[in-house]
Image: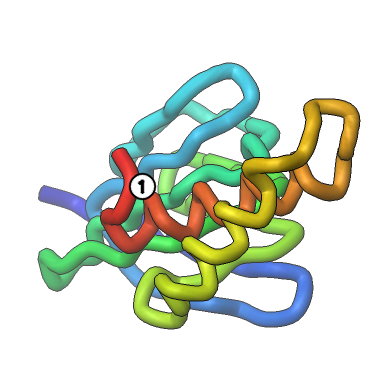
Amino acid sequence: MSDMYVELVAVERQLWAGQALQVSARTIDGDIGVLPGHAPILGVLAEGGVVRIKRAEGDELVAAVHGGFVSVTSDVVRVLAESAELADEIDVARAKAALDRTAQSGPDDEEAVAARFRAVARLRAVGQLA
């Protein structure tokens, strides 16, 4: 199977770059899966999504991603996030506590809604939520 070059970048840093076999991400239009040779697209990443990258070595890199874009050409995928965290960097207890704090908030509290999206994405990235 051929591979493609993938970059996972947040505003504050590059999280990963290298060869990959597949990338999946949630956009505002739905989930997408990208394989080498995919048609070019530009998608807006959904708030509180998870990006999965199946690396050329066979293992999977998972990140909680909050906003941004995904750009695909035939052999390059760039995930440009407003913020992102690799699954192995996430403090599960802290993410659960953040989710609990947002449970009391109403839908009009934009800050709490954004915090809830981030907490859910973190917990999904580490396999604590489906």
| Viewer-proximal residue among 25 and 77 | 25
Residue 27: % across, % down: 58, 30
**Is residue 81 positioned above or below 94 on the image?**
above
Q: Residue at x 54, y 41 (%)?
A: 72
Q: Residue at x 22, y 63 (%)?
A: 60
The quadrant the C terminus occupies is top left
**Is residue 125 positioned above or below 47 on the image?**
below
**Is residue 81 positioned above or below 34 on the image?**
below
Tell me if I can see residue 33 in this picture.
yes
Q: Residue at x 33, y 46 (%)?
A: 129
- The residue carrying pointer 1 sits among few (fewer than 14), some (14 to 19) or many (20 or more) residues within 10 Å by Cα, namely many
Q: Which element type, helix, strand or loop, lies under badge 1?
A: strand
Q: Residue at x 75, y 46 (%)?
A: 114
Q: For the residue marked with disc 1, what is the amino acid?
A: Val
Tell me if I can see residue 17 in this picture.
no
Residue 32: % across, % down: 42, 29
Q: Is residue 10 left or right of residue 123?
A: right
**Is residue 80 positioned above or below 112 on the image?**
below
Spot the residue most to the front. Answer: 104
- In the figure, residue 6 lies in which quadrant? bottom left
Spot the residue most to the top. Answer: 29
- In the figure, residue 9 lies in which quadrant? bottom right
Q: Which residue is mark 1?
A: 23
Residue 24: % across, % down: 37, 41
Q: Is residue 108 left or right of residue 42?
A: right
Q: Is residue 39 left or right of residue 110?
A: left
